[in-house]
Amino acid sequence: MVPQRTLTFLWGDEIVSTQRYIKEDPERAKGILWGMSLDMVGEDTDKTGGSFLIEKMPDPSAIWTRGTDKHSEWGAGDTKEKDLFPHYYNDFIMRICKDQGKHAKWTVNYNPFEGGSDHTPFLQNNIPGLLMWHFTDMFYHTDNDRLDKVSATTMQNVGISALTAAYTLVNADDNTSIYIVNEVKDAALVRLKTEYDLSKVALASGKAKNEEKHIIEVWGKYYVDALSTIQGLSINAQANNVSAAIKSAADTIDAQTKKYLEDLK
């Protein structure tokens, strides 16, 4: 029996090996659906500092970084609206990791897109890709970056999260797709409320209304576009219920975006 989807593990030179894997075989590249970079994972944060992080694919928080969003000490890139990569992958991975964090009392944080690791070749080739990593690490790129800085418990939590996400996606059915639709919709509504509240504060401090409305519009469109990427996730889709769920969720997000824009005065 030939599996309809497979899971590939890559070890090699950072960025270079990933780029070669994507570029050297065009037929193989057509079948790459997701990329996940595990870089500096499994650290003993009591020794190294920092925390486990999920670096998201480019979303509007990489452009308008405000509220509780913050970049790592690695630093922000120069993300523009044309660079945004709407996709369900961000919120799906964050949910998997947060669930493991809650179960294991493991700290999970995230940062807006910055670039600089093996997720970037995937994105540059229009393949969804994100980064699991730790930062800041006081031993980063020093001769003290040794095995005694590794935590078996943290490595276990990262491994469980990464493999749970991977096996869920490669075996996705309609139930998986509808679950992700609901996750993305819920994340969108939380984000829109957050941005609306931040924009009200910004307007009260004298910021331009057009700019604040634009931020909310971009977030609304980002999430509607992210929902559309769930179409085709299921292996052997059985019915039209996924399409109906996507449309219903998109309508909800559109309606809430419109309401916030009307209320923003």
Image (cartoon, helix red, strand yellow):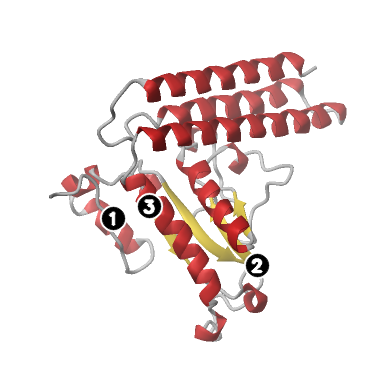
Badge 1 marks a residue whose secondary structure is loop
The quadrant in which residue 60 appears is: top right
Residues at marks 2 and 3 touching, judged by CB atoms closer than 8 Å: no
In this rendering, the label closer to the viewer, 2 or 3: 3
Residues at marks 3 and 1 touching, judged by CB atoms closer than 8 Å: yes
Badge 3 amino acid? Ala
In-image side of 46 versus 208 (left or right): left
Badge 2 marks a residue whose secondary structure is loop
Which residue does the numbered mark 2 point to in the structure image? Answer: 50
Sooner in the amino-acid sequence: mark 1 or mark 2 = 1
Question: Distance between the Cα atoms at labels 1 and 2?
Answer: 30 Å
In-image side of 195 versus 58 (left or right): right
Question: Distance between the Cα atoms at labels 2 and 3?
Answer: 25 Å
Say which residue appears at 55% left-offset and 77% top-offset. 151
In-image side of 45 versus 12 (left or right): right
Say which residue appears at 64% left-offset and 19% top-offset. 256
Sooner in the amino-acid sequence: mark 2 or mark 3 = 2
Say which residue appears at 80% left-offset and 27% top-offset. 200
Which residue does the numbered mark 3 point to in the structure image? Answer: 166
Residue 156 lies, in percent from the top left, at 49, 69
Which residue does the numbered mark 1 point to in the structure image? Answer: 7
In the image, is residue 213 above or below residue 1?
above
In this rendering, the label closer to the viewer, 1 or 2: 1
Badge 2 amino acid? Gly
Badge 1 amino acid? Leu
Sooner in the amino-acid sequence: mark 3 or mark 1 = 1
Residue 152 lies, in percent from the top left, at 51, 76
The answer to whether one can see residue 120 in this image is: no
